[in-house]
Amino acid sequence: MEGRLVLLGGGSSGVSTTESAVLSKVEVVSEACSYPAESELELGLGLSLGGGGGSTGNTKAANSSWGECGRILTAKDFPSVVSHRTNNGGSSSVAVSGTKRAAETESVSHDSGSPTGVSQVVGWPPIRAYRMNSLVNQAKAQRGDELESGIGEKDKPKDALKKKLDYNGKQTSSATVNEKAYLGFVKVNMDGIPIGRKVDLNAHSSYEGLAQALEDMFLRSANSAEKEPLTMASKLLDGSSEFVLTYEDKEGDWMLVGDVPWRMFVGSVRRLRIMRTSEANGLAPRFNESNDRQRSKPI
Amino acid sequence: MQKRLAYSLPDEVLEHVFSFIQSDKDRNAVSAVCKSWYEIERWCRRKIFVGNCYAVSPGMVIRRFPEVRSVELKGKPHFADFNLVPDGWGGYVLPWIAEMAGAYPWLEAIRLKRMVVTDESLELIAKSFKNFKVLVLSSCEGFSTDGLAAIAASCKNLRELDLRESDVDDLSGHWLSNFPETYTSMVSLNISCLGSDEVSISALERLVSRCPNLRSLRLNRAVPLDKIANILRLAPQLIEFGTGAYSAELRSDVFSNLAGAFSNCKELKSLSGFWDVVPDYLPAIYSVCSRLTSLNLSYATIQSPDLLKLVSHCPSLQRLLVLDYIEDSGLEALASNCKDLQELRVFPSDPFGVEPNASLTEQGLVAVSLGCPKLQSVLYFCRRMSNAALVTIAKNRPNLTRFRLCIIEPRTADYLTLEPFDIGFGAIVEHCKDLRRLSLSGLLTDLVFEYIGTYAKKLEMLSVAFAGDSDLGLHYVLSGCKSLRKLEIRDCPFGDKALLANASKLETMRSLWMSSCSVSYGACKLLGQKMPKLNAEVIDERGPPGSRPESCPVEKLYIYRSVAGPRFDMPPFVWTMNEDSTLRLS
């Protein structure tokens, strides 16, 4: 019953690739986790990403090409992995995975030339999530205004906007530079699971990473559920499910994840929901909109 | 003759005498005097404070204290504030509400901190307590505005609704309209944590206008600046006010309207809010500044000159929360202007930046410690510090009771001498004899813990991160700090020895949190089995601790004293180490 889910890595064992390194923020497995052979691994969530072909509904396919309707993988897909800690029991001051470095490999998508300062340890500096989110939201609001001024969604007068940027010019630039560094925890709810979770968006640099993290979160709970009443979800998860990942944006609209560039998504997402495909019909049109962004299957 | 006098005092007289005794500690002492006093006292206890909701069961509380009117509960460990406690850990209030609904029909006040509150719980509160008056939800989560709507609709005598820093699912701003037109009793309303962009301003205004006793109103960010003036004019009797977003296009009519509205509030003592500040609008509050005792600018991203000017207008300030934009120069101005200052909190505007975002160093804190003789409580985020500064602060301000210093980069050394901060914090605990709360940071060896164990005899709460060299550090603290109630540790090389050697100390404390340390699963099991009055819980998201060798360190450990035994609502990633449950562990 030990379905130890291994995080889906892009690369072979070790944390050398971008995607595989990007797992840490979600309070999960230690760095010493080894990765099984990847050929059978695939991302399961039915993201409407590049892969198009996906008209909703098609699917029960067990086929493995990415892009078509995915499924949420179950423990059966993975060999059990137990992390062995015997060796470094006492050797280092941080024996367990408290310190995680998520951001170094994200420099790919970093704007700034300067590296992130404080190593990105979970929960440090000790600033309440409430306060962090406020700072992030102020930063996002400023950036969001920049992004949206072309679309004209906000009806802020341009003067005030400009003024705000001027006054907060210093903050804006540092906020943009470090926006990824702020703890961007957003709530995630999965249909059928009463307790929501939170995921740190800034620990990921792509939709793949996010999808992986979410699968781990919700699959892991389901499989180790001796006590949690997750039977509803488990039934659905056993190979036959179709779940899609959706998000609520700043304007309160629910959209399918994957349509917009990652950074824009991070800037506008308020919360996530793993929705049954059957309920996502209202969003279905987006499945059919062609997306140029082909997501390559992780190897 | 005198002995019999004691027995001849009627119960009602004793009860009347006891009614003057409000503090929990004193009440507990009274109930320990003799059996009859215990009985009398338990029937007239009206207020209960449970610092850890798992330390006792609702049934036990109800059985002992049948006539309670006010309950305060705390749930998750403090480090949950920093996302160190995984979601689903626990802290559910519903079981408490469910039992109190039957037992305390006259319950008036519920105050919760770090608990999971559901809409169902709120609906149950609304239904069950006819004289409900006070609901304070501090850093809670799990509920939405639907639950609030139920409270608004049913609680005719509600006086206080305070959602401070809770995480609310903000479905709509219309819950405010659920307060019936006949409802007029609001005294304190704090909705500053609500995110919704559509707060019903008109419902808010109507509510404010019909509540003549409203003294404290904290709005959320969504309330625009141009609506503030009207709201203030509807409630000139306010003592505390929290603005929404403090920004608007600069217009002189809006400004003068706002300034006029503020000056109309003759009793205003506390201001907060101030998101998205446009500095040109700050002078609108100048008329109230001279009376202000509390100012929370910790969301105001304005620069030092504006902050300095503002602070110079507030000579009566006792409490200031601000971002590091205030800089050393602003703190020096604070030190010379605000002689009544008791509490200072300086937050980082850019916690992850490489370069300091603002010119805030140890000098600012030193200046305040010198200039503000009443300073008692400090929370200070900075990027550099020196032992010399800490020693100066300690000598300047021996009256400090809370000192929390966060040097942002872990294990940073004294920037002048490159030494650890053992001496500096040692001076703090040595000079500040009434210190009750301390948070450490920077480079620290076991020596600092020896100082703490030696001097910090009144210390009740200690927070440690990235510090120490060996178990000796933990041992010093556990064996030396007589008054210690809460100890929270992360990323320190503390292991089994100190913990097991001081196991009985843990029964005198509320709780111990250790994460990313070196405490082995075997030691946790031992503690759980040998110490029945403690709940030892291992939080480990890697899977059952039993699937790994016993010497393997656990991810997180939370030990707390309890008379209720192991809890029943643990999620899959929490394991109890107590004896009867070890069969569960694989």
Image (cartoon, rainbow, N blue to C red):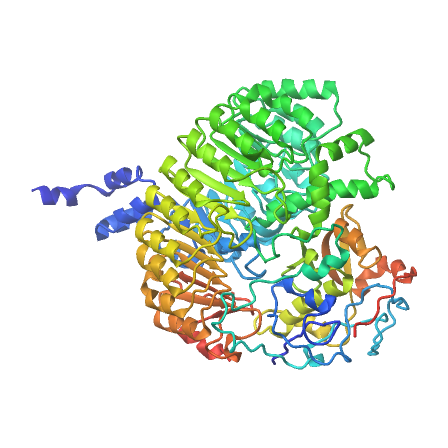
Q: Position of residue B151 (x, y in %)?
A: 58, 43
Number of marks in picture: 0
What residue do we see at 73% from left, 18% from top? B253
Outermost left residue: B1
- Location of residue B561 (image quadrant): bottom left
B153 up-or-down from B506: above or below = above
Q: From the viewer's perspective, is B42 left or right of B217?
A: left
Q: Position of residue A257 (x, y in %)?
A: 80, 59
Q: Quadrant location of residue A16?
A: bottom right
The picture places residue B409, in percent across and down from the top left corner, at 56, 52
Q: Nearer the viewer, residue A142 or A278?
A: A142
* Location of residue A282 in the rendering, given as x and y in whole percent from the top left corner: 85, 57
State whether residue B251 appears in this view: yes
Residue B522's place in the image compared with B561, above or below, is below
Evaluate whether residue B295 shows in this view. Answer: no
Residue sitting at 82 percent across and 55 percent down?
Answer: A261
Q: Nearer the viewer, residue B231 or A67?
A: A67
At x 38%, y 61%, the residue is B474
> In the shown orientation, is residue B242 left or right of residue A106?
left
Residue at (63%, 69%) from the top-left corner? A221
